[in-house]
Amino acid sequence: MTFLIFITSGLFLGWSLGANDAANVFGTAVGSKMLSFRRAAFIASIFVVLGAVFQGRGAADTLNELGAVDALGGAFTVALCSAVIVFAMTRKSLPVSTSQAIVGAIMGWSYFTGNPVDYKVLLKIVGTWISGPVLGMLFASGLFILMRWMLRKSSIHIIMLDQVIRISLILSGAFGAYSLGANNIANVMGVFVNSAPDIFLDFGIFTIDGVQILFLLGGLAIAIGIFTYSERVMNTVGNGILALTPEAAIVVVLAHSLVLFIFSSQSLSNLLVSVGLPPIPLVPVSSTQVVIGAVLGIGLVKGVREIKFKALGGVFIGWFLTPVIAGILTYFALFIVQNVFDIQVSLNRIVDSATVVEKPGLDDSLSRINMVLPGILIVTLGLFLVIVLLYIRQQRLRMKAENELLAEQNQSYASQKTLNELEIKAIQNENELLNSKLEARQRELTNLALNIAEQRSFYADLAAQVDEAINTGDNDEKKQKLNDLAMLLRQKMTFSKETAELYGKIELLQKDFQMKLENDFPGLTEQEKRLATLLRLNLSNKEIASLMNITPKSVEIARYRLKKKLNLPQGKNLSQYLTNV
Amino acid sequence: MFAFKQSRKSIELIERFLNTVDQGGLIFKEGVKNYLQGNKDSFLDNLKTLSTLETDADIIKRKLENILYTQSLMPQLRGDILKLLESLDTILDNAKSNLYQFDVEMPYIPTEIHADLIKLTELSGSAIESVIPAAKAYFRNPETVKESLHRVYLFEKEADKLADAIKRKVFHEMNNLKLSEKFHLRYFTLHIENLSDHAQKAADLLSIMAIKRTI
């Protein structure tokens, strides 16, 4: 339990590392929206843990050579001080390296406890701080030239290239996360290696020891850091030194991953030794600085104008500032922990820095825990959970698709409804128009009926008066009565209601013509206007004469006068002129 | 996560869109020639075809917009690509409107300027035709875009010069024309010339896009 409490500072450091350095691996992919943050964080977390557990030991051993922090209290303080420095510098947006912080802190511990510092190892580590970024720069330049050549040769369509880039970003990111876990887990958990529990977990296919369990915990802390804090960093990455295109980002991540892999791979080092070459120093290098080196490499290929030297200056200041501040802080923190809290920070035995602390050997069979059954159970449970989640996701997608379809159908119904409503409105308007027409016709019919009745009564009256005249014996009286009858008939002809109605209708139809006539020729009399209207209808003189109750000769004279008033030249047809008005 | 099927569909749609614009340019040239030569039926045929091509281009453009955004393809470049498609679509829209104007307004074009107008149409058409290979190159070989673009600029410059000459001729030498007829001719010359200007705008856009894509 005490062990767990003490390693919290290491876990905090792991969290800081995850929050910062995952952006080096997936920053451009997430920042350029080529990959969603959740997906990137998931991939990064898995591969960081794998790298930490299976390839993290090499670099951790080198840190141990620098200063074997042998007491839990000391390890706790060293890790805590490094974490505080990393966190504080990140908050101030300064480029910071976990590796430099932890090396500074270990140096502080060594000076405080009086343990000798192996300057050869220190030189080896500091050497990689320079060779790491330089190697990153070389790799990036080479890879960039190769990628540019391949892209020019391939003539791949931009959209297909987009898909290839996506896959490459994921693959290089996964490799980057693995290398990050392998190389940088030493920074997080390296100081606790000497205090690691002596147990083995046997999973059947593979076995992990106490140190690997420690690294697993560290890896998980990094994963939590990635999930909880790295999104903001990822979204702002790429604006620091050089705005990266996704193609360049692949190169940077690959170069970074290669450098970190090389500096943490025991097998690669052994391979070099077997062919007679010097071994590779297995040292935790700064992920951020290698990325900066790689970006610089691309900048050199593209032209130095694109490099922001101010940002580079910040990196160089970080190289000196971080270890020095970490060392001083650790020195004072150890003093407080030892004297105020009375916690042992060292076992007070001078350790020969060349040899790693040997642990009292425990009985292997006692410390070996069989994890086959729990492992199978966990894997089965995990698989079950994955299947359930996939099923739920599938259901959700189906529901979403159904809802979208439903919404689409609703929209189509709504538009259909609007169209129908418009059609109904149009039909209603037409009906109203027809109704008003029908009403007018009915009115006309009623008028006609009334007219017929009126005329019938007139004719009956007329017949009665004619009979009366016939039956009258006195010739004078008979003559008088016939004269009266003739007068009555003439009056009837002059004030015929039908004629007045006809005029009314014609005037209504020819309203525009009448108005025009009035405007253009204001001197026309009512009679002349009426004649003009009848002429426009193309009626003959005879028809006009009967309608106007005058003789055809009078119509001719009236036409002549009208022609004069309209200022028509000789030979111009009056009817034609009036039709065209 | 990986939308290879949609990507292939998008590639096909882009190719179809570019070919549609290319065909539109050719049909426009034919349409103007047929109008000037008095081939009414062929002109109406051209007008109908151009109208169909314009509608097709609009549909393809909308489909592409949909795919590029829903499948989040090329998040950094899709804005530029859609702007390019919009710019090319404007060329087609203008070509169609121009031909419709010929049909509706039936401008009187004296035979003296027939040859010049045909040449102007050829120049504007060639400017459009030269943008298409550049646009196709952008998608596969951005380094070669610039090589195709200089032709667009050349045709545009020549079209400008010729349009000026036609307008000068109409207003200074053709005194038998009414002022309204001169205005009418000026408008039609301007409209045809504008097509090459639109092609130049697309070319400008392409040249910046090509620089952005060069890594």
Image (tube, rainbow, N blue to C red):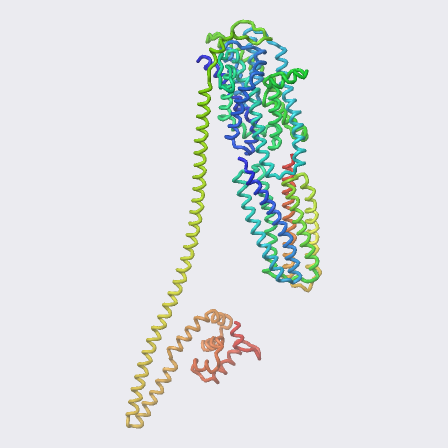
A444 with respect to A56 (left or right): left
For residue B139, which quarter of the picture? top right
The spot of residue B116 in percent (x, y) is 70, 57
Q: Nearer the viewer, residue A94 or A222?
A: A222
Residue A325 shows in this picture: no
Quadrant of the rendered image containing residue B115: bottom right
Above or below, A162 relative to A107: below
Q: Quadrant of residue A67?
A: top right
Residue A544 in the image, given as x and y percentages of width and height: 46, 80
Note whether A261 is above or below A396 in the view shown.
above
Q: Residue furthest top?
A: A349
**Place of residue A394 in the rendered image (x, y in percent of width and height, measured from the top left):** 45, 36
Q: Nearer the viewer, residue A349 or B183?
A: A349
Residue A132 position within the rendered picture, expressed as x and y whole percent measured from the top left? 63, 20
Q: Is residue A439 visible?
A: yes
Q: Quadrant of the C terminus of chain B?
A: top right
Q: Residue at x 52, y 77 (%)?
A: A575
